[in-house]
Image (cartoon, helix red, strand yellow):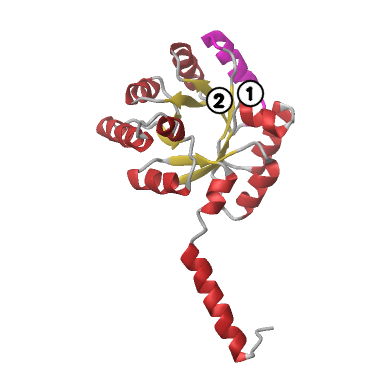
């Protein structure tokens, strides 16, 4: 499973990138706002750092506006994936942009039917929002499983990009189900390395090592 980092914080991206943990980046208007930087400036910096897709989102609500904004965002770098919402106008924009050879990430997906439409429209990525479904007592992981089954049934090439990841358990379940990509905040990715038994083991080893009176350096 590929790891995309869901942030516009270039320092956090750089830290994870140095460890080989970044296959791509996803941003959205809220993350750009949080960064406090100009969208084109910060997106260009991220694109220069990361070889994989960097999702940058349109904000227009009509198809023509999304297409125009998409072409403008694409000028930033070759690895831009244009994000459009899963609305009827978003699907129109997806079709037009993908026909032009651009990567398109269709976001805010909450049903298998929506995912099926996005694949038919030529989406490069479909982004089902797991956490937001969980918030309203709907199993977000079941949606990932349903999309996986449908895409495999018909050989759709659209990649399932599990989004709205809240916990390391979400990452585990997405990987088990077969999501192609998971995008998560840096804190969630780093938390995947934590386990209380690892901490306990280190503590025990260090106590025993102290008793030997030895030093490695």
Q: Please state the horizontal and vertical placement of residue 156, each as a whole percent of the image.
A: 33, 30
Q: How many marks?
A: 2
Q: How crowded is mark 2: few (under 14 residues within 10 Å), some or many (20 or more)?
A: many
* Left or right of residue 172, residue 66 in this image: right
The answer to whether the residue labelled 1 contacts the one labelled 2, judged by CB atoms less than 8 Å apart, is: yes
- SS for dot 2: strand
Please tell me whether residue 71 belongs to the stretch shown in magenta: yes
* Left or right of residue 201, residue 69 in this image: right
Instruction: From the image, tell me which residue sits under label 1.
Output: 73
Which residues, given as a range, are shown in magenta? Answer: 61-77
Q: Please state the horizontal and vertical placement of residue 180, each as a whole percent of the image.
A: 41, 41
Instruction: From the image, tell me which residue sits under label 2.
Output: 82
Could you tell me which residue is drawn at 47 percent across and 25 percent down?
106
- SS for dot 1: helix
Viewer-nearest residue: 130 or 101: 130
List the single residue furthest toward the left.
Answer: 153
């Amino acid at each position: 499973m590929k790891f995309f980092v869901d942030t516009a914080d270039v320092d956090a991206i750089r830290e994870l990138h140095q460890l080989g943990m970044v296959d791509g980046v996803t941003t959205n208007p809220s993350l750009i706002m949080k960064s406090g930087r100009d969208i084109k400036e910060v997106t260009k910096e991220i694109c220069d750092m990361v070889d994989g897709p960097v999702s940058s989102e349109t904000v227009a609500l009509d198809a023509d506006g999304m297409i125009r904004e998409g072409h403008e965002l694409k000028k930033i770098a070759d690895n831009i994936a244009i994000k459009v919402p899963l609305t009827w106008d978003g699907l129109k924009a997806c079709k037009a942009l993908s026909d032009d050879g651009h990567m398109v990430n269709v976001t805010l997906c909450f049903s298998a039917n929506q995912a099926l439409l996005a694949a038919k429209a030529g989406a490069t990525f479909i982004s089902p929002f797991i956490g937001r479904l969980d918030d309203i007592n709907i199993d977000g992981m079941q949606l990932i499983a349903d999309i996986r089954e449908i895409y495999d049934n018909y050989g759709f090439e659209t990649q399932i990009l599990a989004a709205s990841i809240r916990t390391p358990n979400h990452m585990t379940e997405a990987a088990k189900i077969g999501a192609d990509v998971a995008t998560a905040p840096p804190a969630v990715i780093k938390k995947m390395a934590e386990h209380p038994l690892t901490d306990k083991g280190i503590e025990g080893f260090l106590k025993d090592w102290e008793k030997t009176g030895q030093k490695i350096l």
